[in-house]
Amino acid sequence: MKDGQRYKLFFYDPVRMRQDLEAEISAGKPCLAEPNVILLPEVTIENIEKAVQRSWQDGFFDELKPI
């Protein structure tokens, strides 16, 4: 980040998120929960960079604890 802080993020695309949700349900869990999730149409470096930049502008990181 511009201020030097680092954050732990988890990037998902809808297909993978659905697969992981189905695996959790099959294992008897009621949900899929991941902290600091950013859902992308496709996980690519370009999409990650754009999403992080936009999330920063939108204040997404104001609610997160830096690592």
Image (tube, rainbow, N blue to C red):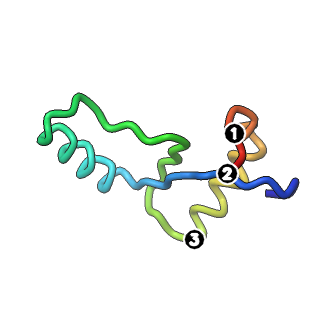
Mark closer to the chain start, 2 or 1: 2
Residue with the mark numbered 3: 45
Toward the viewer: 16 or 10?
A: 10
Toward the viewer: 8 or 40?
A: 8
Q: Amino acid at mark 1?
A: Lys
Q: Are marks 2 and 1 in contact (CB under 8 Å)?
A: yes
Secondary-structure class at tag 2: loop
Q: How far apart, in angstroms, are the residues tagged by discs 3 and 2?
A: 17 Å
Percent position (x, y) of residue 44? 51, 69
Secondary-structure class at tag 1: loop
Q: Amino acid at mark 3?
A: Ile
Q: Amino acid at mark 2?
A: Tyr
Residue with the mark numbered 2: 7
Residue ranking furthest to the front: 67
Secondary-structure class at tag 3: helix
Numbered circles on residues, count:
3
Query: What residue is shown at x 60% (from left), y 69% (from top)?
Result: 46
Query: What residue is shown at x 14% (from left), y 41% (from top)?
Result: 27
Q: Are marks 3 and 2 in contact (CB under 8 Å)?
A: no
Toward the viewer: 7 or 52?
A: 7
Mark closer to the chain start, 3 or 2: 2
Q: How far apart, in angstroms, are the residues tagged by discs 1 and 3?
A: 23 Å
Percent position (x, y) of residue 47? 57, 63
Q: Residues within 10 Å of mark 2 (few under 14, many from 20)?
A: few
Q: Is residue 62 left or right of residue 42?
A: right
Q: Is residue 42 left or right of residue 63?
A: left
Residue with the mark numbered 1: 65
Quadrant of the rendering where the N terminus is positioned: bottom right
